[in-house]
Image: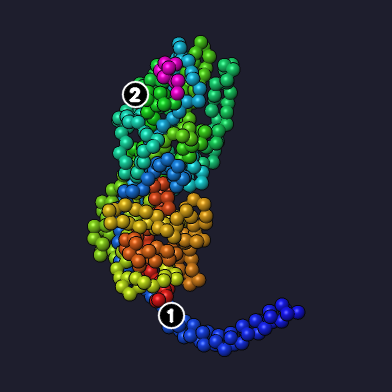
């Protein structure tokens, strides 16, 4: 009884103390809360275009190169662009070509049926195939503007053609038991006999010794790979699935009157690189790059190592110690009269990198690992969208990056580019900062 009396007495005393003192403490807290200001502001920014040479098209463990393209087109806004594919092929077995007689060498390349083509669908494409004159190194990083030598040895030329994604191909293939041929039906794909240069490639392969096929590493020293690039005619770009089993070199030969075939596929551990050449001469993009004020109400961003959008934050005075509650960058989509969005659809997903003072680029913190394991659009934004007012735009959540910028931890320059800036061909035209309802950076912050 004494114990419970003591506990109840203690609790009663505690309640009396709280009743006497708490209102003053709470009132003081509310008074301090009223002093904390929450502000909404539009941060002054300037925007321009710049060429971007730091777009990798091959990097070990890189997952942002989902397709490869070959071709050439003349974009009415961005000018001329050419796309080459350089790639290695490998071996899955050790052949013995003793007394073998060459039939033909055929390159087959699976179409990417998701992306298909880029450019006018009524145009034609003309592709040529060359032997590489340099080794592709798996641990190297290759960029959109990397120089890769083909040695100028033409192996085959397709002539002008329109890709056919609907009709399957029936090919007479040698039977594995050596008893003649069988007709095999393949999905639609690009197929080219490499018979130029007096069948030089077929002769090279058949002349290799058994030791030359001892490993893929040894084989690639003897045959470095192939390059597929466009001929002079401008038209379209064709997407290829480089790691599809159908993308391979097919060597047809006979041995002791028996028809045989050896296939050299693009194995998963081999290198496939896209490189591009741009010529902006005479285009609106050239005018905007060389004279930033000439088209200050429009900005242009293009993949394939084309232009990116540079955003410079001009004034952060007064918010160095503030807490950034929310920061949102919006880029409304714009159009030029000569733009054909059917042939050149706008980019689906843009990203933002910090452009450091030394020229290096780094994905901003608001993206982080979202590129690989979470929903980028839901948390960061950057996807093409239509807002409640019916305006088509890109919207980015850059709260963390702006907080770091306010503290002086990062530069005040951001670079906006395509998520697949080294891969999927696409481009967008957006409204610049000088136009009404143009690009804006709005923040909400608490001034402590």
**What residue is rendered at 39% in x and 43% in y?**
57
Q: Residue 418: give x, y in percent of width and height.
A: 40, 54
Q: Magenta residues? A: 208-215
Q: Looking at this view, is 311 or 240 the one in front?
A: 311
Pointer 1 local density, CA inside 10 Å: few below 14, some 14–19, many at least 20: few
What's the CA distance linking mark 2 and mark 1? 79 Å
Look at the numbered disc 2 and give the secondary structure of its residue: helix
Determine whether, in the image, residue 428 is placed left or right of residue 283: right
Q: Looking at this view, is 404 or 343 the one in front?
A: 404
**Quarter of the image where the C terminus is located:** bottom left
User: Is 222 situated above or below 55?
Assistant: above
Asked if disc 2 and disc 1 are in contact, CB closer than 8 Å, the reply is no
Q: Residue 284: give x, y in percent of width and height.
A: 29, 57
Q: Residue 100: give x, y in percent of width and height.
A: 46, 14
Look at the numbered disc 1 and give the secondary structure of its residue: loop
**What residue is rendered at 42% in x and 80% in y?**
37
Which numbered tag is attached to residue 375?
Answer: none
**Quarter of the image where the N terminus is located:** bottom right
- Magenta span: predominant SS is loop
Q: Residue 242: give x, y in percent of width and height.
A: 46, 37
**What residue would you read off at disc 2?**
197
Q: Residue furthest front?
A: 2
Q: Quadrant of residue 394?
A: bottom left
Mark before the other along the chain sequence, 2 or 1? 1
Which numbered tag is attached to residue 36?
Answer: 1
Tell me, yes or no, if residue 330 can be seen here.
no
**What residue is rendered at 69% in x and 80% in y?**
6
Q: Is residue 252 magenta?
A: no
């Amino acid at each position: 009884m004494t114990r419970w009396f003591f506990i109840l007495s203690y609790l009663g005393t505690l309640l009396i103390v709280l009743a006497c003192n708490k209102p003053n403490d709470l009132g003081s807290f509310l008074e301090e809360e009223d002093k904390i200001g929450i502000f909404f502001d539009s941060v002054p920014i300037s925007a321009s275009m710049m060429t971007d040479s730091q777009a990798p098209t091959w990097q070990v463990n890189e997952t942002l190169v989902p397709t490869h393209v070959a071709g050439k087109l003349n974009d009415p806004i961005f000018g001329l662009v050419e796309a080459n594919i350089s790639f290695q092929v490998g071996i899955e077995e050790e052949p013995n070509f003793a007394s073998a007689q060459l039939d033909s060498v055929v390159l087959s390349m699976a179409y990417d049926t998701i992306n298909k083509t880029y450019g006018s669908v009524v145009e034609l494409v003309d592709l040529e195939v060359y032997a590489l004159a340099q080794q592709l190194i798996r641990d190297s990083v290759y960029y959109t503007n990397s120089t890769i030598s083909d040695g100028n040895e033409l192996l085959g030329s397709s002539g002008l053609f329109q890709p056919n994604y609907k009709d399957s191909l029936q090919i007479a293939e040698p039977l594995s038991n050596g008893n003649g041929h069988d007709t095999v039906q393949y999905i639609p794909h690009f197929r080219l006999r490499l018979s130029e240069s007096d069948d030089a490639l077929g002769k090279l392969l058949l002349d290799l010794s058994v030791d030359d096929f001892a490993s893929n590493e040894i084989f690639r020293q003897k045959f470095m790979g192939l390059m597929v690039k466009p001929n002079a005619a401008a038209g379209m770009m064709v997407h290829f699935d480089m790691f599809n089993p159908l993308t391979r070199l097919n060597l047809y030969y006979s041995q002791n009157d028996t028809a045989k075939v050896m296939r050299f596929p693009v194995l998963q551990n081999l290198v496939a690189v896209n490189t591009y050449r741009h010529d902006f001469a005479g285009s609106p993009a050239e005018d905007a790059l060389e004279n930033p004020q000439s088209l200050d109400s429009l900005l242009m961003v293009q993949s394939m190592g084309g232009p990116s959008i540079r955003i410079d934050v001009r004034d952060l005075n007064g918010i160095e110690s503030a807490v950034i509650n929310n920061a949102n960058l919006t880029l409304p989509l714009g159009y030029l009269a000569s733009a054909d969005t059917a042939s050149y659809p706008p980019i689906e997903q843009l990203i933002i990198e910090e452009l450091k003072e030394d020229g290096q680029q780094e994905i901003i913190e608001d993206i982080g690992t979202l590129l690989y394991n979470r929903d980028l659009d839901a948390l960061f934004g950057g996807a093409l969208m239509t807002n409640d007012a019916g305006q088509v735009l890109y919207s980015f959540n850059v709260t963390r990056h702006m907080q770091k910028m306010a503290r002086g931890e990062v530069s005040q320059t951001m670079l906006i580019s395509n998520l697949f800036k080294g891969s999927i061909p696409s481009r967008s035209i957006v409204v610049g900062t000088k136009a009404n309802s143009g690009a804006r950076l709005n923040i909400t912050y608490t001034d402590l």
